[in-house]
Image (cartoon, rainbow, N blue to C red):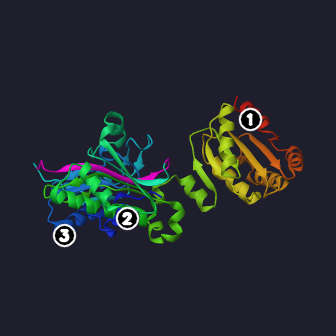
Amino acid sequence: MNLHEYQGKEILASFGVRVQRGHIATTPKEAVDAAKQLTEETGTGWHVIKAQVHAGGRGKGGGVKLAKNLKEVEEIAEQIIGMNLITPQTSAAGKKVHQVLVAEDVYYPGDSETSEFYMSVLLNRGAGRNMIMYSTEGGMDIEEVAEKTPHLIFTEEIDPAAGLLPFQARRVAFNLGLSGVAYKEMVRFVTALYKAYEQSDASLFEINPVLKTSDDKIMAVDAKVSIDDNALFRRKNYAEMRDVREENPIEVEAKALGLNYVDLDGNVGCMVNGAGLAMATMDLIKMAGGEPANFLDVGGTADAKRVEEAFRIILKDPNVKAILINIFGGIVRCDRVANGVVDAYRNMGDSIQVPIIVRLQGTNAEEAKEIIDNSGLAVHSAVQFKEAADKVEAVLK
């Protein structure tokens, strides 16, 4: 589950990480009120107005601007709130901005003593350990740094049994070229950041940039945070932070129905039981000359109601030109699935306008094929993988 910048900063601050302070606003008037409050709290006269969307590169799309007075705060907030922000990490349509973060300006005019760093905490899947990735090149796309100057990226792997050790936090500060007060501040920052990552069940904490101010304070100016969905049952306060407006509406609806669904860019809808079979089915579709339009795992139950719900979810994608149902009858009998497909098809009537290929294998597979073949509906049955692939290829021509 992705969080907004202001939410990520709230979590960081709760673990003692120094962050750029700010307040959220959903209207230009609220933005002005937030700026006034921030001035009282911090003494800042300039404010940074930041669009709150789940996408990076907001500044490149005009979603981060500096306001030097309250009039500019209102004008900029009016420009950003409601806009469709297009960044390198959004679709061509962009993302609608519903709220902005009014933050303190932590960059002092004419100050050359500040430094920006990149830092993230994430799982190194290859090593099976958490790691801290960091660089002296903050404020830049880390992919660009990795491509052009890979020697400027450092990593610190964390032993799961020992956790982050003091010498590792010191090594991070040393590799970033810090000394004196800034060195000690960075050690504290890294220690608190890793604690926040570990104790919030996060899958990613990315801070770009981490700022060293001219008076040697270390703070998070940005925060990209993802919380592990599988841990939300014990992090109910974080689960309440979910902003479904930022998520794919079809995926949100599927989740509410208990379906495991991921939207993709292809033309063949998939309805499968089991993640492994779903991956194999997607390969099958590509071998047949198509592209999977989704990952959809209906799980161990595939009665008429569940199949109908899955149909409706798949058909919300206008790019779908065919649907492949590939079910292995282990827990659920194939004939039951076949009856579910037939009943769902009849219930939906004319709303199904694309060819459907059904491959059922396992318990009562032969009976299931007879049910499909004798239904009188425009449903193509298959038994073997190759047969299903051939039928997908045929209907796409």
User: Which type of secondary structure does the marked residue at label 1 adopt?
Assistant: helix
Magenta stretch holds residue 121: yes
Q: Amino acid at mark 3?
A: Glu
* Callouts 3 and 2 close, C-beta under 8 Å: no
Q: Which stretch did the figure color magenta?
A: 111-126
**Secondary structure mostly seen in the magenta stretch:** strand
Q: Amino acid at mark 2?
A: Ala
Compare marks 1 and 3 and give the one earlier in the sequence. Answer: 3
Question: Mark 1 and mark 3: span between their CA atoms?
Answer: 64 Å
Give whichever of 235, 269 is nearer the camera.
235
Contact flag, marks 1 and 3 (Cβ < 8 Å): no
Using a 10 Å C-alpha cutoff, classify the residue at mark 3 as few (fewer than 14 neighbours), some (14 to 19) or many (20 or more). few
The answer to whether any part of residue 104 appears in the image is no
Mark drawn on residue 389: 1
User: Could you tell whether 389 is left or right of 76 in the image?
Assistant: right
Q: Earlier in the sequence, mark 3 or mark 2?
A: 3
From the viewer's perspective, is 246 left or right of 132?
right
314, 108: nearer the viewer = 108
- At label 1, counting other C-alpha atoms closer than 10 Å, the crowd grade (few under 14, some 14-19, many 20 or more) is many
Residue holding disc 2: 196
Which residue is drawn at the image coordinates 73% and 54% (left, top)?
Answer: 307
> Which residue sits at x=82%, y=51%?
338
Label 3 secondary element: helix
Label whose residue precedes the other's in the sequence (2 or 1): 2
Looking at the rendered structure, which numbered label has been put on residue 41?
3
Classify residue 49 by image quadrant: bottom left
Residue at left 71%, top 46%? 352
Q: Residue furthest top?
A: 397
The amino acid beneath tag 1 is: Ala
- Left or right of 97: which side holds 233? right
